[in-house]
Amino acid sequence: MTDAQLPYPAARIVDTRDTVAGISFPDPYRWLEDDSAETAAWQEAQNSLTDAFLGQWPHLDALRSSVDEHVADGTGSPNWLVDPTPKFAGGRWFRLARTPGPGYPDSAVLVVSDGPDGPGRVLYDPVRDGGRPISWFVPSPDGRIALFAVNQGGSDLGQIRLLDVETGDELPERLPQLTMGPMITPQWLPDSSGFFYTAGDLSAESFAFRVYFHTIGAEPPAEPEPVTGAEGPTVQVAADGKHAVLTSVWPLPRYVCDLPERNWRPFVPDLDASVAGVIDGDRYVAVTNHRAPRGRIVAIGFDDPDPAAGRELVGESQRVLSHVRLVGGRLVVTGSVDTEARAWVFDRDGRELEEVPLPGRGALPVDVMPNAALVAESHPDEFVFPFSTPVSSPGLYRYRWGSGQVDTLREPRVRLAGATSTLRWARSADGTEVPYHLVLPEGADGTRPLPTLVTAYGGGRVSWPAQYPGPVAAFVAAGGALAISHQRGGSDLGTGWADAGRLRGKQNSLDDLYAIAEHLVATGATTTGRLAMTGWSNGGFLAGNAFTQRPDLWAAVVPQCPPLDVIGAHRLPYGKFALSAEYGDLDDPGEVARLAKMSPYHLVDETVAYPALYIHAGGADVACPPRPPRQFVARVQAAEATTAPVLLRVWDDVGHGTASNRSEAVTHATHWLAFLMQRLGMTPAGLRHPGAAHPGDPA
């Protein structure tokens, strides 16, 4: 089956227009939004075509083995959403583990043990519960209850479960609301009598978060109590049990209450800045970008909140400050210098005591999310943290004050033998210097053109750090180069860097991506005929624009779970929520006109010869459903000038990627990597590299 002979399923054209803020756009494939029998048949035909195309490649099984070996601790889904840190409670440690044995390597089990790693007792085994994977877990402070969420049917919405740790029996509590992914986890009261949790409300016109409080042990079991008088997805509870803070999305601690009364009152008012930290007695100690794009540490009193002038503990400097934690009576501040992770220890008055000697030049995977430090610490007295580099999977480490050295609790499962990672800079269209990490395989020095894959996220004030690439490590093991982009839109160089690539600056983020691609070609690292790009979620939006705005740069593009119809996002609750926060205002005609210039579905030109395309989508994806990818693919397949393959794979019972079990995620990654490697003339690594994990190894 050659490129020019691909028998694409027919897609009829309808005379439909999408009118937004008075501006009208042709929408010839609107019918592919419908969950009709016709749409289902068309999608199935696309899946069959994609599977047949990839099935011809003789190295598919070998690649799957390589991906399986290199996934390591993650599931193959975006590993920055999965917190691998064990949690300490009631004198014991709780963690997710993959114990060798039938069935176990595919689904992580919840384990309780005396130490942060090593042998333990299984509390919950997904294999014995229909294969429903765990998306997050939070033990009660006394260690007597395991609170966690399980996903079903691939959905990122999780059902909350509670188990008695001693007996393993499920508690009679019933919580009907579904939680939204692993990014916003519940927080317990210090006496373990109840907890706050957040549910995603998909019934609203625009996606919303609802906060609830649940009391343990009521007779009969109590219904969850909605939190009223305050809005925001994340609740933090003070270790002394005196206060709770409710934080909005970006984040901003907008409300505080006294416990146990829960009398919420305004705390930090609306502020065009982020404030994220920890409760320390009668004050909130936080990293803020208010008047400090790279971050500073302030203390804001609950009785006299003044975030604009809150007492500054640590001023802004050249280092990027991203999170602050209160551990063992000290402030642990994590951040980065030139995109590479760093950690410093301060006393509670802001006096710097020491720097944590991190084990390499890489990333603290948990810290990529802006709200990461809003979660209670895993240990009250020790800094326990995962760390990875672009060439080594996450290990688990501990730092004790004043020791000057980090203890290794668990070695990285996989190391890419002989591979190297270096920081490079490209010049964007407006003259801004944009960093990226280039990972080269064993024996390469960057002077000989290699098949090269650029990965990017670039949005949501989320960094895309120099961390282990999970399944993409198989691409490097096969002799390819990997470029990890740190473009504007992400917070890799601070929130000022992020905001310069959001909303009206969104094109900056795209231009940064293109500058990196051009720099790779100009420096001889690759050629446009050997260059590919992929991104997930917002990165899928970038990939869609890379495909339509700059088709000349790429041999192949793989958008994963992508929002490809920016204009049509107003018809999707989560799409409307994300659009207003990241891209622009669809109620403003000027904004609609701007957004149309970066809406991949609307940019398709039938006279352009586009590069090869493979779109990965999940049939149960709440955030980025497969409707826009279907429409986009139909439009590109109809472009007569394009002879390269244009393929779509929608996986049934798969969501945004965070709820896939290990074997599913390996299969998904194998497919899109096979597409790229086939286009770039690559073959998988034939032998396991020294130090690579076996799929049955514990994780």
Image: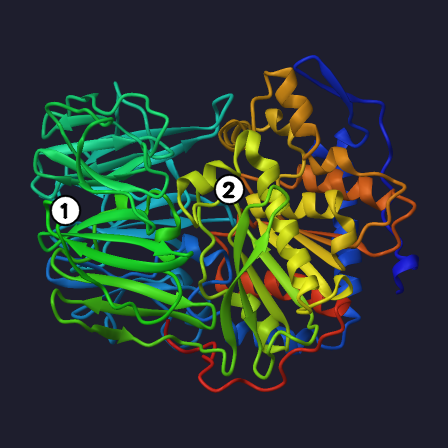
Which residue, as the protein is rendered here, is positioned at the far front?
431
202 to the left or right of 172 = right
On screen, 534 above or below 180? below
Name which residue lies at 70% across and 29% down: 596
> Mark 1 and mark 2: span between their CA atoms?
29 Å
On screen, 382 above or below 411? above
Q: Along the line of sight, which residue is nearer the eye, 319 or 172? A: 319
Say whether disc 1 or disc 2 marks the residue closer to the N-terminus.
1
Q: Quadrant of the N terminus?
A: bottom right
Quarter-of-image position of residue 158: top left
Instruction: Give, as a three-letter code, the residue at label 1.
Output: Gly
87 to the left or right of 66 = left
User: Disc 1 designates what residue?
Assistant: 350
User: Disc 2 designates what residue?
Assistant: 489
Instruction: Give, as a three-letter code, the residue at label 2.
Output: Gly
Residue 197 is labelled as none
Q: Along the line of sight, which residue is nearer the eye, 106 or 607? A: 607
Q: Along the line of sight, which residue is nearer the eye, 531 or 266? A: 531
Name which residue lies at 66% across and 26% down: 594
